[in-house]
Amino acid sequence: MLKLYGYWRSSAAYRVRVALNYKGLDAELLSVHLVKDGGEQHQAEYAILNPQELVPALIDSDSKGELQGEEQEAFVLSQSLAIIEYLDEKYPENALLPQDLHDRAIVRAMAMSIACEVHPLNNLKVLQYLSKDLALDDGAKSAWYHHWINEGFSAFEKQLVKYSGRYCFGDNITLADLCLIPQVYNANRFNVDLSPYPNIVRIVENCNRLDAFIDAAPENQADAG
C-alpha cells in the first residue's frame, strides 16, 4: 500500500499526485499542513519520517528498505523527483521517462531546470524567510518571485521550441510536464505575466485537459482551503 504525505498547495506533492494518477496507482493521501500551528511538517512525529521536514514523503508498505543496516518495516522516501522515478521504475506502465538514453537525459534535465533551479527559490520556506527574517514587504517579495520565475521560464521556453510536441518532450507525458504544471500554477497565483511564454501556456492547457492533472490540482484536494 502506498501512502503520500503532502499538502494541497505544495508543488512537489502536486508532481507526485500527477504521477500516481497517470500511472493509475491508488495511494492514501495524508495532509501535512505547512502553515497551521507553525507548520505540521516540523512536528516531531513527521520529522522522524522525513528529517528534512518537507513534503512530500512516500511510504510503500509493500516494500522494505534498510536504515543503517537494519531492515525497515516499510520503505520511506522523500524528494519528489526521487519518488516519481521510484514509482516509474516499480510501475513501468505509462512511463514518465523515454526509453532512449539521450532522450531520457534531456527530460531529466528539463525537469530539474524547474524542480532544482526555479522552484527552490520560490517555495514557502524561502518566501517566509524573505518576509520574516529579512523583513521584505509584499512588493519586494513579489519582485523576487517574478524575477526567478521569468529567468527560469525564459530558458525553459527556449527548450520547448526545440523539444516540445503536444507536451514538454514530444507527444507523451513525461517527468518534465509533471514539474512544469505545478510551477505555472504557482506563477498564476503570484500574477506572473505568462504571455512571453506561448509554448509553456500551450503545454499547460494540454496537460490540464487530462484527468491525471485535473484530479491532482490543488483545489481538488481534500485539505484545500
Image (tube, helix red, strand yellow):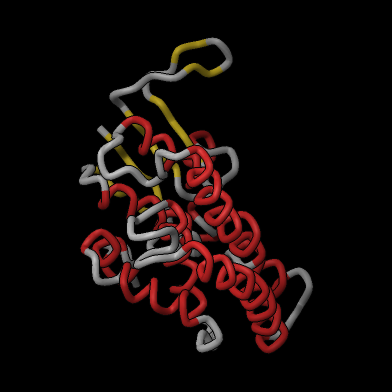
Q: Quadrant of the N terminus?
A: top left
Left or right of 191 on screen, residue 139? right
**Pick the front one: 5 or 12:** 12
Indicate the position of residue 94 as horizontal and vertical percent values: 27, 44
**Pick the front one: 149 or 53:** 149
Residue lying at 49% horizontally and 73% vertically, measured from the top left: 186
Q: Is residue 193 above or below residue 107?
A: below
Left or right of 79 on screen, residue 27? left
**Pick the front one: 88 or 72:** 88
Q: How many marks?
A: 0
Indicate the position of residue 81 as horizontal and vertical percent values: 49, 45
Q: Is residue 191 above or below residue 45?
A: below
Q: Quadrant of the C terminus?
A: bottom left
Q: Is residue 50 above or below residue 75?
A: below
Residue lying at 33% horizontally and 60% vertically, measured from the top left: 171
Note whether residue 45 is visible.
no
Indicate the position of residue 126 as horizontal and vertical percent values: 66, 64
Residue lying at 58% horizontally and 15% vertically, measured from the top left: 68
Which quarter of the figure has residue 69? Answer: top right
Indicate the position of residue 67 as horizontal and vertical percent values: 53, 18
Residue lying at 49% horizontally and 62% vertically, measured from the top left: 163
